Image (spheres, rainbow, N blue to C red):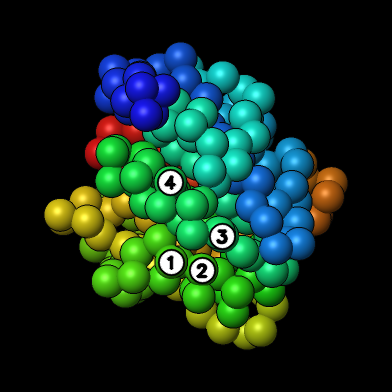
Amino acid sequence: MHLRILSLLTLFYFGNITSQSIAVLQYGGGGDWYSNPTSLVNLVTFCNENIKTTIKQKPVVVTPNSVDIFDYPLVHMTGHGNVFFTQDEAENLRDYLLSGGFLHIDDNYGMDQYLRKELIKIFPNNELIEIPGDHPIFSNVFNFPEGLPKIHEHDNKKPQAFGIFENGRLVLFYTHESDLGDGWENPEIHNDPQEVRLKALRMGANIVKYAFEN
C-alpha cells in the first residue's frame, strides 16, 4: 500500500512533459505486446525534435499489475492477438488511470475483439465512446480536422478513435483501423511513404502532448 501511495505521488510530481519515459504494457493472453519494436523510439525522437519534449528515448516495459506503472504518465499498448487481464490487473490499471495516468491502445490489427471485453473489467460502467474530430487531441499540436488518420489498410474500414472518460478527463485512447504504430516504425519495415509516416508521427505527438499535460 505504501509503495502504491509513493508511486502515485511520483506520478503527480513528475507528470510533466520533461525527463520522463513512455511505458509499454506487457499484457497476458498470448497477444504480441512486443510488436512494432522501433515505433516508440522513433516517436520519442520525433517529439523531442519537433515539440520540444525531453522524453527518454528507450521505452520501459511494465505489467498491468505492477506498482511501477504509476511512475509513467503514458502507457502504450499494441498487438495483433488475444488480450487478457486478471481482476487484480484490471483494478490496478483502473487505479492508475484514475490517479492521472493515460493509456493509449493502438490496434495493430486483430486485437479489437479481445480487447473490448477486457476493457469492461477495467471500467465496467463506462462505454467506449467514439472521439470526434474536434476533440483537442486532434489539434493540440498538429491539426487533424477529420480525426484519426489512416496509416495502414486492412479491411477497407475507416479509422476510428475511441475513448473512456472519467470526470470529464480522457483517460484511455483507443486507435482502431489506423495502425499508427506501423507508421512510427523504421521506414524500411513497412515501406510507407514519408507523408504517411509523417501523419502517424504527428498524430503520435498529439497523443504524447495530451497524455503528459492533461
C-alpha separation, residue under disc 2 versus residue under disc 4 = 13 Å
* Residue at 51 percent of width and 51 percent of height: 89
Identity, as a three-letter code, of the amino acid under mark 1: Lys
Q: Is residue 158 above or below residue 6?
A: below
SS class, disc 4: helix
Q: Are marks 1 and 2 in contact (CB under 8 Å)?
A: yes
* Residue beneath disc 4: 92
Q: Residues within 10 Å of mark 2 (few under 14, many from 20)?
A: some
Earlier in the chain: of badge 1 and badge 4, it is 4
* Residue beneath disc 3: 85
Q: Is residue 33 above or below residue 208?
A: below
Earlier in the chain: of badge 2 and badge 3, it is 3
Q: Position of residue 38 (x, y in %)?
A: 74, 39
Q: Nearer the viewer, residue 40 or 192?
A: 40
SS class, disc 3: loop
Identity, as a three-letter code, of the amino acid under mark 4: Asn
SS class, disc 1: helix
Q: Residue furthest bottom?
A: 156
Q: Quadrant of residue 107?
A: bottom right
Q: Position of residue 56 (x, y in %)?
A: 56, 19
Q: Quadrant of residue 16?
A: top left
Q: Are marks 2 and 3 in contact (CB under 8 Å)?
A: yes
Earlier in the chain: of badge 2 and badge 4, it is 4
* Residue beneath disc 1: 121
* Residue beneath disc 2: 118
Q: Position of residue 6 (x, y in %)?
A: 35, 20
Q: Is residue 12 above or below residue 149?
A: above
